[in-house]
Image (tube, helix red, strand yellow):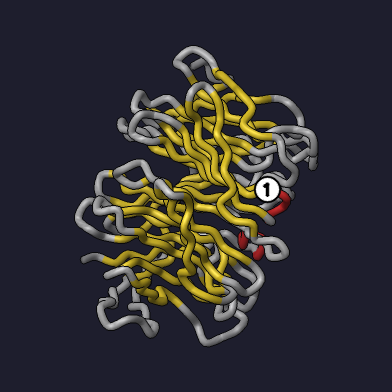
Amino acid sequence: MKPLRAYACRVLLGLAVFAMHLATSRAEPEDCIPREWAISVVDPNLADADSYVADISIFMDAGQPRIFYAKGPIGDNEWPMKSASQRSDGWRIQRLPADSGSNRPSVAVDHLGRYHFAWRTGEFFGQGILHYALIERGVWSEEIVDDVLGATSDASIAVDAQGHPRIVYTPELAGLPMRYAKWDGTTWQKEDIVLRSGILSPSLVLDSAGKPHVAYLVDGGAEVDYAFRSGGGWNVETVDIVSPNQALATSLALDSKRRPHLAYDELFAVGINYAVKSDTGWSTELVDVGQRWTPALVLDSGDIPHLVFYDAERGAMVYATQSSGSWCLQTIEDDPSELIRIGRDPAIALDNVGGIHVSYHYHDAFGVCLLKYAVSQP
């Protein structure tokens, strides 16, 4: 890969205040076991209410959580990226040397522990182009993948077994397709997936054979679709038509048999949907009912789903999992004040011993945004 620029990732460091308390439980089936959550402030310096809609990614790095997120904006398309790593004395905050761009950077990690990034840059609407970056041995390398103006809005990145990045990205201008970019070790190979209006929220996953699977929204969130590459082309399926309601976000995972599991929200008061594809098609169920937004999904080694999402009615961060076929729901963090909103755009990761790690936004009564972290150990 020939990056446009490479330089050491030497950035400003800072430590966040470490505060801990335990979460409360919600009513749940008798076989659900409440978990205890330890909660801390990661970064008290997001500093604006617009961080409501900024993506977060969380990974386990040598047994410790590492979080990537956007801070801002200075302008609408000038969000800088930051990284937070937990240390024994608190959180180490780093400003990443990325070209400032959208509030939704996508991040993936490969088997060598290298982090890969995909995001949109562009000063105005209709000028979005696709950027990619790699952190390897502390060095940041960045390049442009697709320089077609308006061809990039949202992006989702995954990494194959060889450590090569794959990116699905949606357009911000009508008449342009959602595209798939694959690094083959020498150059970027790009191809069209689908041409639809209002494509949003792609969620890309690679299966054990390296084949891509992506969930996304079309018609501005009126329909939830799924596509996978097979036989040299893309197969597209409709998972759900939610119109006249609207979906905001998708989160896709594959189980041990390569079956897709998909979480998505449905506004305005339907809730969080969970869809699974079998040999007979898609089956969908409600995880929680009401104003529930922006789910994040992972599957554990036993193919059990773990979800986090935002309860917009209470302004609370919620965790859900399945036990004996039922959904177990638990509030990770809440506040009695209607002015405090907790849990927008969460991220979730599992460790090797059954621990659950979650990061999310916390907005106080004065519009200041914090980045927070919650962990529950078995």
Q: Is 58 displayed left or right of 126 in the figure?
A: left
Residue 147 in which image quadrant? top right
Left or right: residue 300 versus residue 353 is right
Q: Residue at x 32, y 81 (%)?
A: 29
Residue depicted at x 34% and y 47%: 255
User: Looking at the rendering, which quadrant does residue 32 occupy?
Assistant: bottom left
Residue 178 seen in render: yes
Camera-side residue: 13 or 310?
Answer: 310
Q: Which quadrant, please, contains the C terminus?
A: bottom left
- Does the image show residue 43? no
| x and y percentages locating residue 84 in the rendered image | 42, 51
Assign a secondary structure to mark 1: strand
Residue under the image location 25 percent in, 44 percent down: 62
Who is closer to the viewer here, 48 or 324?
324
- Vertical placement of residue 315 versus 294, above or below: below
Residue 368, how many percent across, how many down?
A: 61, 68
> Amino acid type of disc 1?
Val
Q: Quadrant of residue 152?
A: top right
Residue 151 image position (x, y, % from top left): 72, 32
In-front residue for pair 145/184: 184
